[in-house]
Image (cartoon, rainbow, N blue to C red):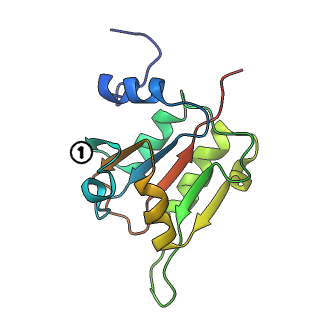
Amino acid sequence: MLKGIPKILSPELLKVLCEMGHSDRLVIADGNFPAESMGKDAIVIRMDGHGACEVLEAILQLFPLDTYAEHPVNLMQVMPGDMVETPIWKSYEKIVGSADDRGAGAIGQIERFAFYREARSAYAIIATGERALYANIMLQKGVVV
């Protein structure tokens, strides 16, 4: 047992977060994301019983965001014509704002198919049980100073 580590973070996930280096990317995927097919060259960690916000909040307690990237956090952009609301993005802004001085300014958006391309080269993908649509979020690791 360790103190100060959010209990939602499994030993497997802690190991992955520790192994990641500067500029490596991590995807926190919603329940609809094709994590296994996108993660053929990545580590896929299943967290089906958890939502994306609780996973993001726990990870950002330990995971530094890249200060050299304009947007070390990226969301999957809603496809033109999709009549989808994305209230979870406001929750993401609040969580990121608690972890990074740039707040919402640290968050960008990537077109859906470009997000998939980027996800294929991520170090790891966390497959959550998140039911919100367009709830996929990609983090780029920074350095601990």
Give the residue at x 25% y 54%.
Answer: 36
Find residue 37 and report its image quarter.
bottom left
Q: Quadrant of the N terminus?
A: top left
Residue 126 seen in render: yes
| Amino acid identity at mark 1 | Gly
SS at mark 1 in the image: loop
Residue at the limit of the structure toward the front, as seen here: 41
Give the residue at x 49% y 39%.
Answer: 57
Find residue 45 and report its image quarter.
top left
111 versus 61 height, above or below: below
Q: What percent of the width, then of the height, locates residue 84?
A: 44, 80
Q: What percent of the width, then of the height, locates residue 48?
A: 24, 47
Give the residue at x 71% y 48%.
Answer: 69
Q: What percent of the width, then of the height, locates residue 76?
A: 50, 66
Q: Which residue is mark 1?
A: 49
89 versus 14 height, above or below: below
Give the residue at x 44% y 59%.
Answer: 136
Q: Nearer the viewer, residue 139 or 129?
A: 139
Find residue 14 and report its image quarter.
top left
Q: Nearer the viewer, residue 69 or 133?
A: 69
85 versus 134 height, above or below: below
Residue at the limit of the structure toward the bottom, as seen here: 81
Within 10 Å of disc 1 (Cα), the crowding (few <14, some 14-19, many 20+) is: few
